[in-house]
Image (cartoon, helix red, strand yellow):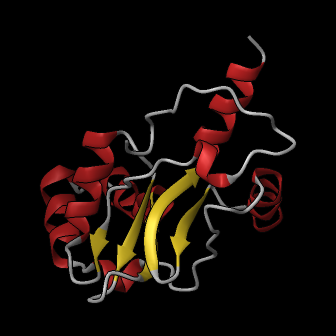
Amino acid sequence: MVEGERQQRSVDLATAKVSDVMSPTPKTLGRNDQLSVADDLMKSERIRHLPVLDERGGVAGIVTQRDLFHSALVRALGYGTAVRDKMLGSILVKEVMTEDVITTTPDTLLTEAATTMAEHTIGCLPVVSGDALVGILTEADLVALVASSAT
C-alpha cells in the first residue's frame, strides 16, 4: 500500500497506533536520484512525500511536493516544460531534500503523531523501526481515518 491507499479497518482514535493507519510500503528515493525521478513518482502515484534512503536503507531525508515548487516557478517565468524537465534532470535529490527528518514509530499513539505533525507544520512522518523505514503517516491518512469514523 502506498501513500494514498487507505486501510479499511475501524480503529478507536483514543488508542490507535501509527501502525493502524500508516501506509506500510511508501515509495522512496535514493540520495543520488535525479529530481525528475521524484517529480515523475509524485505525479504517477499521486503522492506528495517521498522519503529518501541512504546507502544502508535508513532515512536520510525527505522530498516533498513543496520542494518541487521551484519547477513551477520556471514554468511560470515562461521557460516551458522542456527547460523545466532539463533542470529537474540536472538536480540531485540530496541537493534539495530536507535532512533533519522528524520520524515516528509504529507503536506511537496516533494522537501523539498527529500532535507532532501539527506542532511542526509537516504533512507526513516517516515511520521507522530501528533504522529501517517501515511506513509513512500522512495528513491524508489522518483525514481518511476521521472521515471513515464519521460514517
Nearer to the camera, 146 or 9: 9
Nearer to the camera, 25 or 89: 25
Nearer to the camera, 82 or 63: 63
Q: Residue furthest bottom?
A: 55
Tell me where residue 124 appears, x and y as whole percent.
59, 58
In the image, residue 10 sits, relative to residue 99, either above or below, namely above
From the viewer's perspective, tell me whether residue 45 is left or right of residue 49.
left
Classify the position of the N terminus by image quarter: top left
Identified at 40% across, 83% down, the residue is: 58
Identified at 15% across, 70% down, the residue is: 89
Can you see residue 143? Answer: yes
Identified at 53% across, 65% down, the residue is: 126
Classify the position of the C terminus by image quarter: top right
Toward which corner of the image does residue 26 lie, by quadrant?
A: bottom left
In the image, residue 117 sits, relative to residue 62, either above or below, namely above
Identified at 68% across, 31% down, the residue is: 145
Q: Residue furthest top?
A: 151
Can you see residue 78? Answer: no
Tell me where residue 4 appears, x and y as whole percent.
45, 37
